[in-house]
Image (cartoon, helix red, strand yellow):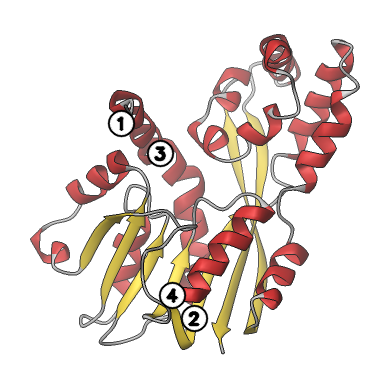
Amino acid sequence: MKDTGSEHQVAIGHKNVVERLWTEPAFEQCRKHLPKPPNANVLVAEARCGMVPIKWIEDLPETTRVMALDSSSAMLDTARQRIGDDLQRRIFFVQQRVSQLSYADGVFPAAICLSGIVTARQAQEGLGELTRVTSSGGQVVICAPLATSFPEFYDLLDEALRAHGLADALGRLNDLRNSLLSPARLLDTARSLRLTDINVSELSWNVAFGSGREFLYSPLVQESFFPHWVGAIRSSEREPVLRYIGDAIDTYWHERMMRSTITACMLKATKI
């Protein structure tokens, strides 16, 4: 049975934190590149709490409708509560994940995904499905965080692992970091799917956290890199390592905000 209370808390955290630190800056930097087909149904995968479809539809012709998908029923419920009767006739929220779309091949002239893709495998699966359901001549746009985001964390994790005699985990950390994304890897993925007119743009913006705990347990970090970071550490050893990192952040940034950078990549391409 699903823990609906926990899922609801994740949705609240996403709406209050992730939208501010990721969704809004990512959308605004991608906005001018998003397609605007008339008289059509378009797709938003990993729509989360609805910010992307709600903002995108402001730029779309009135005759265009949006299918907004997410795997979380709590996030979809939150998204539905944000729109009035007018948008309910144009945005349709459906529970699906980007890696397992139920639609037939070639039905959407435009498909976008600005959340939920973090690793190379997720990019291959997600972009593959988006390409499959996009019609010939249609456009696909994704935006994903890069491995170069939060560069300070890797120095802190290296220090924490060595301090706890866990240098053997550094190799696993490097392997996990290599599973994350780079612009070149996204470009290779698009080419392997035989997409054309490929445009890859690197984006960046600054974020800030008030403490080590706020950083480590931020919904943004928890939704994106955290599972991959801690995957390098045995479960029995994680708590002291994370406590060390949190204390180090509070020491190094004493009474100051911890400022860091998110780097992301937007990929826009056309299906042959």
- Labels 1 and 3: the sequence-earlier one: 1
Mark 4 is surrounded, within 10 Å at the Cα level, by few (under 14), some (14 to 19) or many (20 or more) other residues, namely many
Q: Secondary structure at mark 2?
A: strand
Q: Where is residue 136 shown, x and y percent of the image?
A: 48, 89
Are dots 1 and 4 in contact, CB under 8 Å?
Answer: no
The image shows residue 25, relative to residue 206, as above or below, that is below
Give the label on residue 133, or none: 4
Residue 214, given in percent of the width and then of the height, sits at 55, 23
**What's the residue at 23%, 64% (across, down)?**
91
Which residue matches tag 3? 14
Task: Determine contact: label 3, label 4, CB under 8 Å.
Answer: no
Q: Is residue 219 visible?
A: yes
| C-alpha distance separating marks 2 and 4 | 11 Å
- Of labels 1 and 4, earlier in sequence is 1
Look at discs 3 and 4 and give the one toward the viewer. 4
Residue at horizontal 65 percent and vertical 82 percent from the top: 194
The residues tagged by marks 2 and 3 sit, at their Cα atoms, a distance apart of 27 Å
Looking at numbered disc 2 in the image, what kind of residue is underneath it? Gln
Please give left or right for residue 268 compared with residue 160 in the image: left
223 or 108: nearer the viewer: 108
Residue type indicated by callout 1: His
Q: How many marks?
A: 4
Q: Which mark is residue 45?
A: none
Mark closer to the observer (1, 3): 1
Name the residue beneath numbered marker 2.
139
- How would you rate the neighbour count of disc 3 (Cα within 10 Å): few for under 14, some for 14-19, many for 20 or more? many
Give the residue number, with chain letter if any, for mark 1: 8
Residue 53, quarter of picture:
bottom left
- Measured as percent of width and height from the top left, residue 41 is found at 29, 77
Using the image, determine if residue 149 lies above or below residue 28: above
Residue depicted at 69% across the width and 15% down the height: 238
